[in-house]
Amino acid sequence: MKHPKAPIADPFPEPRDRIERLVLTGFMGSGKTTVGRLLAAQLGWRFVDLDEEIESFAGRTVAEIFAEDREDAFRRLETTALQSMLHGVALVVALGGGAVLSASNRKLLAMSSGTLTVFLRASSSTLYARCLRQSADPQAAIRPLMGNSEAFAERLARREDLYREVADLLIDTSNQTPEESAESVFRAVRSTL
Ligand code: S3P
């Protein structure tokens, strides 16, 4: 089992666990996938996007799973996918924005030795603007829970403490490019790799 969570300002309790995988968490639009790919490339590690993992297992998109089976079914698939990812080494995992809703998922992250969980945070308006920009791309994944800006902000407010609860490290991405966020994470973790 890993050490109990330290305050975010001091992400590395002594003695340090050797970090074998990084898990990126945060709300929709926080850059988990983009930053995760950059970070994995920089580390020479494999990158896994949990939503894509679920889609290839289910043979359907996230939006289809939500529409056909509802959110609960998606959340169950998410827990199974997370469980299996936490066995991987030299791995960067981007969670879906709602993965922290499940107490089981939060416990899995807390108990997983060798896992460092990074919360990529930004304000609701920044996140919403990013999601709107992304949704203009016809290739982009549809986000069934995006909603309008008010619903988006309320959902984020309900989750903010959960992201903080699971995080070993918090990076404020509001004024950062994805490259800068990846560099911030890299600098914070490199001495433990
Ligand atoms: C969700 C976020 C999505 C995806 C699903 C549910 C959420 O992932 O898992 O649509 O509950 O916030 P992203 O955070 O990558 O958009």
Image (cartoon, rainbow, N blue to C red):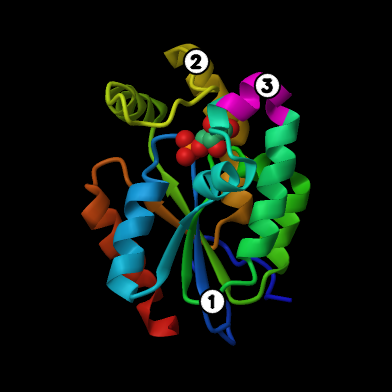
Of tags 1 and 2, which is closer to the observer?
A: 1
Q: What element carries label 2?
A: loop
Location of mark 1 (residue): 89
Q: Is mark 3 on a helix, strand or loop?
A: helix
User: SS at mark 1?
Assistant: loop
Mark number, residue 42: none
Amino acid type at mark 1? Val
Quadrant of res 145: top right
Magenta range:
64-71
Mark 2 is surrounded, within 10 Å at the Cα level, by few (under 14), some (14 to 19) or many (20 or more) other residues, namely few
In which quadrant of the rendered image does the C terminus lie?
A: bottom left
Residue under pointer 3: 68
Numbered circles on residues, count: 3
Residue type, mark 3 in image:
Glu
N-terminal-most mark, 1 or 2: 1
Classify the position of the N terminus by image quarter: bottom right
Residue plotted at (62% across, 55% down): 166
Q: Is residue 57 left or right of residue 51?
A: right
Q: Is the magenta stretch mostly helix, strand or loop?
A: helix
Residue nearest the viewer, comparing 11 with 105: 105
Q: Which of marks 3 and 1 is nearer the N terminus?
A: 3
Coordinates of residue 59 in the picture (x, y in percent): 59, 39
Name above or below for residue 8 compared with residue 28: below
The quarter holding residue 134 reads top left
CB of residue at label 3: within 8 Å of ligand 1? no
Q: Is residue 181 magenta?
A: no
The residue wearing badge 2 is 147
